[in-house]
Image (cartoon, rainbow, N blue to C red):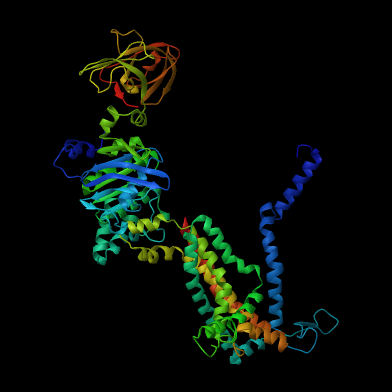
Amino acid sequence: MSGASPTLTALSRWIHALLLRCGLRGRTAVIGVPYLWLVLFFLAPFVIVLKISFSETQIAMPPYQPLVQWVGERLADIRLHINPGNYFYLWEDSLYLRAFLNSLKVATISTFFALLIAYPLAYAIARAKPAARTILLMMVVLPFWTSLLLRVYAWIGILKNNGLINNLLIWLGVIDQPIVMLQTNFAVYLGIVYSYLPFMIMPLYANLEKMDLTLLEAAADLGCRPFRAFVHITVPLSRPGIRAGCMLVFIPAVGEYVIPALLGPPDSLMIGKVLWTEFFNNRDWPVASAVAIALLLILVAPIVYLQRAQARDATGAS
Amino acid sequence: MAPSATESAGKREPWNTPQEQPYVRIEGVTKRFNDFVAVNDVSLDIYRGELFCLLGGSGCGKTTLLRMLAGFEEPSAGKIYIDGLDMNGIPPYERPVNMMFQSYALFPHMTVEQNVAFGLKMEHRSASEISDRVAAMLKLVKLGEFIKRKPHQLSGGQRQRVALARALIKQPKLLLLDEPLGALDKKLREHTQFELVNIQEQLGVTFVVVTHDQEEAMTLSTRIGVMDHGRIVQVGTPKDIYEFPNNKLVAEFIGSVNLFSGRLIEDEPDHVRISCDELDTPIFVDHGISSAPQAQLWVAVRPEKIQLSVDAPQGTQNWTRGVVQDVAYMGDTSVFLIRLASGRIVRVTRPNTLRHDDAQLTWDQTVYLQWHASSPVVVGS
């Protein structure tokens, strides 16, 4: 400010004071950026979907009635078309409930197996030599360089009746009829576990890697065998990582569409698939929106739980 | 005030009693990490009820030696016996040894009570026995009221006591302490030193303490083993180590010292005389040494064993002349840096027994330094 004229300095001070009076500081501006992002790209679409979910279907462009309609000349001449029927419909037709429950089941089982596979992997990477860690982590992330769709298609090639596995087994003489794997629930679980495994490994690795290994020495010193030390020390201390990993797998897995559509049985009842059908096949946007909102509400519970647990961990950490 | 352990153990000197069996026997132990030799052919006997300090600078191998006693590292060569049992291949969880870690290594997800109870839980003790013993132990370390706290809710000193309680709960034969007071501030450290000695006396456990703090080693221990570059340089009581360092390094490491390089000019069984280029008169030592005549050797004189005077002393030995270059007032003592004619700076400390005594000696004043014939120690290099 040294070169600026006194009037300019005074002016900038005045503007600064004015902004302060409005509650705007540099700090607010910095925090404001992510808030703006969330409002634009999360809250606004959410409100639109919410709005559609309360409207009524009609054959038009767009295929739903507006919520508020002006019928007269004056501002007060409005007609409200609030239709909660879409939500009742979700409850009445057991298809939706079954789809929700089935999605939750598939997501839960997939999360469990992802954890079972990811934990030893993350543990091994975290305990590997620092030079090897980078390479191993790279190998975990590497599949992300190709699109998910391609990788799922590759699984079709592996699993189908004349695919890699069956051909190999037949060639080896282990079986003479191909095992049906594609378009089974097994393939759905396999696909989900495979696709979301890195999301489980990463938070687990981050957690296990920063664990203080002298704690294990202290446990051993107090008469604790390695396996018990793992159960009593390592696992409880990695709980934040387990939680974060499970959420990162569970939440997208509930709404997963592509994997069950490509690998699962044609009649597989997953909420993501139902959503797709409502939206594109039935062109029933309001019901599709209601499904989306219901899905969101179901997922709010685990997210809130996660946030609370993380807050607890944060206060308990140091 | 010296802690009582030093006093009582001073009467009982198992290391001077031939029929006494050492409790911990370290025999020619070497530890190599790839090309680096962390511990180099160390042999050491530690006796029951001792509070033995391994003292040395960082990287001298003291912690590695401690970790070998705990079982976290296996010696590359040599053997370790604890209570007559060969510890080779015995994992940490089967050793009759407990350790207090430098970082304390308290389990962050457990309460104070659970931390202390952990060792007993691993032994599958009954719930009532565990809670009784934990309560008694927490009382001993004065933590009774913090039983339900988690480690992060405690102060440094409290954590230190939890770590101590956890390490003592299994009544180990041998307790290993890695820099037990390192993380505490000075005041708390002094207080805890005495507490540690009291607890050690009450329970009669053998302590092996690793420290880089020579003051801590002096106050705590019955004996000190000074380590350097993976070797034990000298083993002895704090007094032995301070008054009779056998080595230039030990002399320099323990307290401060003035080292003079000299030549032996008279070598009798009951005294020696050493000529020293930096001093005005030769050094006369009132005890004999074992060294070849004319050999180049080092004489150590402690700063507090040198007297300063304004008048020239009588006699033809054990004094020299210098100029006061610097005076540092430390409260209880004053440190004088005296420049000799040879340019050599000699450190002298004087207790401030009188409030206005220092006025006599001041900067640039010519003074005479003298010492008693029993004060100089001839050390190897």
Left or right: A136 as drawn, with respect to B329: right
Pick the quarter of the image with the C terminus of chain B.
top left
* Foreground residue among B341 and A54: B341
Quarter of the figure with residue B53: top left
**Image location (x, y in percent) of residue B312:** 34, 7
* Foreground residue among B275 and B156: B275
Pick the quarter of the image with the N terminus of chain B.
top left
The residue lying at 35 percent from left, 55 percent from top is B146
Left or right: A304 as drawn, with respect to B344: right
Q: Is residue A315 above or below residue B51?
A: below
Residue extending farthest right:
A73
Residue extending farthest bottom:
A93
**Image location (x, y in percent) of residue B72:** 35, 53
Whether residue B181 can be seen here: no
Whether residue B37 can be seen here: yes
Quarter of the figure with residue A273: bottom right
**Image location (x, y in percent) of residue A96:** 60, 88
* Foreground residue among B347 and B185: B347
Q: Is residue B108 above or below residue B156?
A: below
In this rendering, the count of numbered labels is 0
* Foreground residue among A221 and B156: A221
The residue lying at 78 percent from left, 89 percent from top is A59
**Image location (x, y in percent) of residue B2:** 26, 34
